[in-house]
Structures are given as structure tokens and as C-alpha cells.
Image (spheres, grey):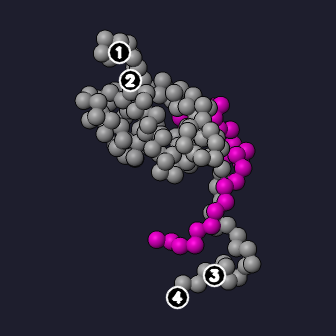
Amino acid sequence: AFVDAYAAAFPEPPPTFLCAKLTDRFFKDETETETSPELERCLHGLFSRYAKTGLEEGKESAFMDEEAVNAWILDINRAPGRGSEYRAAQKAFERNGAKRLMLTDFMQIYKDELEAGKFWGVAHDLWTTNAASGCLPDDAADLGTFAARFDHIF
């Protein structure tokens, strides 16, 4: 039978997972349904670094082409063609019928990352690309601590 060693040893078992607390920086409130305006500004700024401007349905708009996506992926994942962001960008290319990643696609990629619980991955991308200003502090220690307890390893 499974016995929780911490519960057996401590009246109040300590956390087994500690890391920077990010949710209050990425979401408007505790419901975690809407991203914060600060995060949206940071992501828009990140998109703008790589985006080009061209005509889309007769209107000028910003987009990331394949070259821009590859540069972004290389910056955040340190290797081309890897990571969930890369796979999501490829799916967006297919949906769009062209190798164009629009701002809405880019924002959705990061919203999907957050919905998957990849808070620290999003923070990594912002810090790695120097796009965190206004959303995250320079030092993760300034964020406070997220503490949780994992009692099973799968």
C-alpha cells in the first residue's frame, strides 16, 4: 500500500516543489482566464521584434514569416525546429494557408502555453529575449514563491 512518507513524518508536510510565483503577473485575477495587460504588452513587443509588415487582404499588417519564426524559435529554444511553440507555429501556418504567423496566432501560442501550465516556460522566453520589462522583474526572487506538494511521481 502507498504510504506518504512526508505525511507520516510531519504533522504538516512541507512543500516538495518551490519556484517563482508567476500567475499573478500573467493573469488578471485568480480565475486565470484572462491574461494581464502587462503580459499582452510584453508579448506584443516580442512579436514586433520578429514581425515584418506586408499586405494582408489589401490591408497593411504585421506578420512573422518562416524566417522570423525560425529566428524566434532559435532565440527561445536554442535550436531550430523544436519546442511546443515551434509545433504550434507550424499548425498556424497550415491554418492560415500561408507561412504567416499573425499577432493573434502568436498570442494564442502563449495563451496555450499558459493553459498547459507552462508558466516558467513563458517567463523563460520573455527573459531570454529581453522582452520581460513591465511584466516580470529582472530577478525571479522578486516574484515571491510558489510552493506545492507532489505526492506521486508518474
Which three-letter amino acid code belongs to the residue tagged 2? Answer: Phe
Residue 12 position within the rendered picture, expressed as x and y whole percent measured from the top left: 73, 74
Q: Is residue 52 above or below residue 9?
A: above
Count every numbered label the image shows and give the total: 4
Residue underneath mark 3: 5
Residue range in magenta is 127-154
Distance from label 1 to label 4 (Cα)?
A: 63 Å
Residue for badge 1: 54
Please tell me which residue is depicted at 56% across the width and 49% down the height of the picture: 120
In the rendered image, the vertical position of residue 64 relative to residue 53, given as above or below:
below
Q: Position of residue 72 (x, y in %)?
A: 43, 34
The residue under the point 46% across, 71% down is 154
Three-letter amino acid code at disc 3?
Ala
Determine which residue is flagged by label 2: 63
SS class of the residue under badge 1?
strand
Name the amino acid type tagged 1: Gly
